[in-house]
Amino acid sequence: MSAFPDHDDHDGWVRLLADPIRAQRAFWHLVLTGPEALDSVRRGLDSPIDDVRRWSTKAMDHLVDADGLSTLVRMLEDPDPGVRLEACHALACDRCKDNACRPDAAAVLPRAIEVMLDDPGAHVRAYAIELVGRWVHTHPEAETALIRCRDHDPSPAVRKKAGWYAPGGTIHRRTAPSRSRRASATR
């Protein structure tokens, strides 16, 4: 008897996300399966098992579609800090996505700011900085929140990272729109 489900038993592969020995293989099986596994991965987000929710959130980073973005925003409220961290990453990261689905500031930014400023986990707050930083050049509330985080977060590491994304920081300068792009955008 095999320790792994049939290739197309996506729910079975999601259940394996609870097994620390098989979770990584199950994760990659689901991600490489692609959109066919998406419904099962979404069901994994509601699992009572923290590891299944965490791995499922991580898989959503690769598989997310427009309908799944609101689900990822909901995962920012998960009781497990590992799930919240993966949700921040999934919403912030463009490299992992196999499609053109990107989060909308109106749907994500207010909750991302709350997580960055108020989450009890310093690691989660640090990941939320990258998410808020996506909109630092286009949304004044993102800039204000990053400055507040840089100046007042209880963690020196979080304050340092926020400083990179806040005005004057290295990442802020590197990601700033060029003058020619800004000039053409105002025409």
Image (cartoon, rainbow, N blue to C red):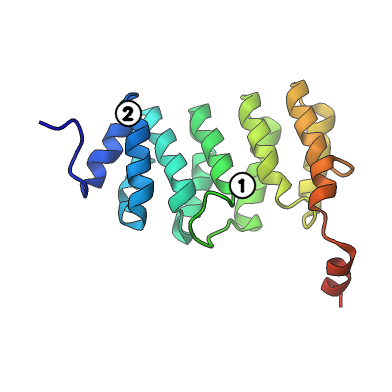
Instruction: State the quadrant of the C terminus.
Output: bottom right
Q: Which mark is on residue 146?
A: none
Quarter of the figure with residue 176 = bottom right
- Label 2 CA crowd tier, 10 Å (few <14, some 14–19, many 20+): some
Residue under the point 79% across and 41% down: 165
Rounded to the nearest whole Å, what is the CA distance between mark 1 and mark 2?
A: 25 Å
Which amino acid type is marked by label 2? Ala
Position in image of residue 112 (x %, y %): 64, 43
Position in image of residue 151 (x %, y %): 85, 30
Left or right, 132 with reference to 56: right
- Any part of residue 113 in sight: no
Whether residue 62 is situated above or below residue 25 in the rendered picture? below
- Label tally: 2
Residue under the point 53% across and 40% down: 87
- The residue at which mark 2 appears reads as 18
Label 1: which secondary element:
helix
- The residue at which mark 1 appears reads as 92
Position in image of residue 69 (x %, y %): 50, 53
Left or right, 53 with reference to 130: left
Left or right, 39 with reference to 69: left
